[in-house]
Image: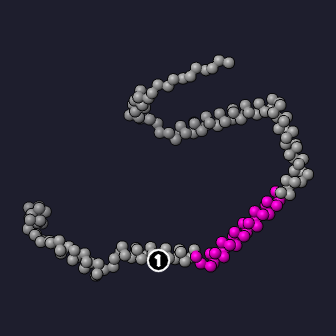
Amino acid sequence: MSEEQMPDIEEIKERIEIPVEEDDIAGIKAEEKSNGPDVVEEFKRLGRQFAETIEAAWNSEERIRVETEVREGVHSFVDEVDKVFREAKGSATAEKVKGEAAEAKARVENSDIGEKARDGIVQGLTWLSEEFGKLAEQFTPVPTEKGLEDIAGDVVEAEPVIEKAPESE
């Protein structure tokens, strides 16, 4: 068929006239329900069955028996661990370790070692923070010209920062 022989869609619509009444639509929907399976109803039925199955499994004697066994096992474990800690806490070895720890703490507090350790920790944390910053920059996309304009606009719109003067000692 050539383009000249092919009718336009609008022409086809004008040629075909199908009368539709609202009563007919309701009748068709009722007929479809009675003729074929209702998907919504099947989902409801499946949901009810699933819930009943879960409830039956939860209330089953087997689940209750297993739960009871697990609870008893956990309680036994906790009791044994608690017993070991109580025995260790009261032993002569534990008292000796406590005394040595107290002495070591006092030596560190009264020496330069404690201050050097704090300085070393601060240095290490600062370095780690800087390294994380470098790593984060690797994952940050490079701003485009448009992005730079947005950033410049944000800087102009931002409130001024007032720095507090350092206190003199």
Residue found at the very far top of the displayed protein? 168
Q: Residue at x 69, y 69 (%)?
A: 71
- Residue numbers of the magenta segment: 59-85
User: In the picture, which quadrant includes the N terminus?
Assistant: bottom left
Going by the numbered disc 1, the residue's amino acid type is Gln
Residue 97, compared with residue 127, is above or below; it is below
SS for tag 1? helix
Relative to 13, say whether 97 is above or below. Answer: above
Q: Position of residue 77 (x, y in %)?
A: 76, 65
Q: Position of residue 169 (x, y in %)?
A: 68, 18
For the view shown, which residue lies furthest in the bottom direction? Answer: 35
Query: In the image, is 7 to the left or to the right of 35?
Result: left
Q: Is residue 1 left or right of residue 162?
A: left
Tell me which residue sits at (69%, 70%) in the image.
70
The residue to which callout 1 is attached is: 49
Quick one: 144 or 102, which is closer to the camera? 102
Q: Is residue 122 above or below residue 166?
A: below
Q: Residues within 10 Å of mark 1 (few under 14, many from 20)?
A: few
Our reading of the magenta stretch's main secondary structure is helix
Quadrant of residue 41 within the rendered picture: bottom left
120 with respect to 14 (left or right): right
Q: Which of 139/60 is in front? A: 60
On the image, the x and y values in percent for residue 164 come to 56, 22
In this rendering, is residue 144 above or below 20? above
Residue 152 seen in render: no
Residue 123, position in %: x, y? 69, 32
